[in-house]
Image (cartoon, rainbow, N blue to C red):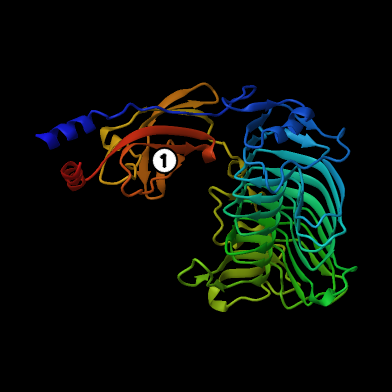
Amino acid sequence: MKIKKVLSLTLALILCTCSVSFAFAEGQVPDGYTPIYTAQDLDGIREDLSGKFVLMNDIDLTEYKDWEPIGTEQSAFSGKLLGNSMVIKGLKVCSTINSTNRNSSGLFAFTNGATIKDLCVVDADIKILIETTCFSSVGIISGNSRHSQFINCSTSGNILARINGTCSVGGISGETIADSAIEKCESSVNITVDGKSELYVGGITGSSNSKISVCHNSGNITVDNSYSINKESDIICIGGICGNMFLNEINNCYNTGNIAINCVSDNSCVGGIGGSTFSLASCYSVGEITFCNQPPTITTGEIAGNVVYSFNGIGLSENVKSTVENCYCLNSNYKILGNMLPEQIINACTLSEEAMKKQESFVGFDFEIIWEMEENSYPMFRESAKSSSDNGIISAKIIYVPLKNRIVFGYGAPALPNGIVVKLTYLDGTVKKAVIRKTENGFFVNDEKVTGGFIASVNTYGILTDTLFLNDGQIKMEYRYLVIPPIITVIRWLIHR
């Protein structure tokens, strides 16, 4: 009787559904966001580094002769910035650094846990002279990025860096690490680096251990180590997309920018996509690679210079092996890959100018969702593939959660979300009800993927909250559910109370 009473009381806690959503239509400020109308508003982000911001106008920074990058290593920007397809122009950073501390330059100096989305930065001009030996990173949007997301961003302008020490330089972000991601981004930034010791330079990012996908670089890269004392021993990694990629993948990317190496170094790794890299898939490069002061190194490739084919490090129980799959280059002057085990290569080849303009040449490319080809041109991204919110959904609200999703027996993992009913609001004002369905590719509502935790948390009982996301995380929905302990746990609790 006592057990029945406990179970009845527990079941009585079955909760109502609640939801939280945010998104914005044209001219509207999404809930919880601070609008940015002026350059002064943008400068004010540094006063609330964990805040959420949205650009409501194009921003002109030309009045700032030397922009102070936002955030420090100790207090990085950890909030959200929605570009709202507006433009920031006239960003100028002109600094001489004498400190031995880690230095970082860009619109943001350091980000950690940030999301920067739908942002366009044009005509940027960054000039950095670092006279002391230190770690440094330079990018147009961010210098150093940890746990950060860059989605549907574009940049143009110039970076000129003279570095005395280890540096990472990129058109979007200088250094992109720790579960970050760069997706659907484009850069036409011309990068010139003169440095020594270790130089990592890429059209999108200089060094990374984070995924890079659906990105395009058209900026030219020039790297020099002429003033280095020990030129031959300098480590130099240059890539049209990423200079040095560690244990992650570059996929669905292409480079049309040229690379010029005015260096003398036996340790140069140079590639049209990646300098020193891990896995590559569905990429191509047509940029020209030129060595000015030495013959090409053995780790030079039209696609990748040095491919790290396996790694067995801390935290990995077995070797993780890389692959290079469905990658193409134009009229190779060098090897396609500087080095690679043959068994790890799946369809990487050189194409003639004529073949590069035929869709059938690009085996493995997704021409239904990601790529398209116009007559007499190379592959390019579909507009829908570049857009971060092309489905038109601006808000979503959970209106019904089935009983099976509200009660979980024995474990802290939420029930899977299939069956939950959601009300969707579209840009044109249309409102629809839809059910979250389970497919072989995950959970979807009206073709929009639903993501969330769904991770078991053993021995967590009571009322818990699960969060679902749409639109690449822009729309957030929450609902509560009840976790009831196994009956044996209840009996033991009653015996020992």
Vertical side of 323 occupied by 463: above or below: above
Question: 77 or 284: which is nearer to us?
Answer: 77
Residue bearing mark 1:
444
Left or right: 368 in relation to 459: right
Could you say where residue 422 lies in the image, as x and y percent from the top left?
A: 40, 30
Give the residue type at disc 1.
Phe
* Residue appearing at x 60%, y 40% in the figure: 387
Could you say where residue 361 lies in the image, as x and y percent from the top left?
A: 61, 62
Q: In which quarter of the image is residue 495?
A: top left
State the SS at label 1.
strand
Left or right: 467 in relation to 489: right
- From where the camera sits, is residue 328 visible? yes
Vertical side of 347 occupied by 124: above or below: above
Question: 315 or 364: which is nearer to us?
Answer: 315
Give the residue furthest to the left: 1
Q: In which quarter of the image is residue 50?
A: top right
Question: 113 or 444: which is nearer to us?
Answer: 113
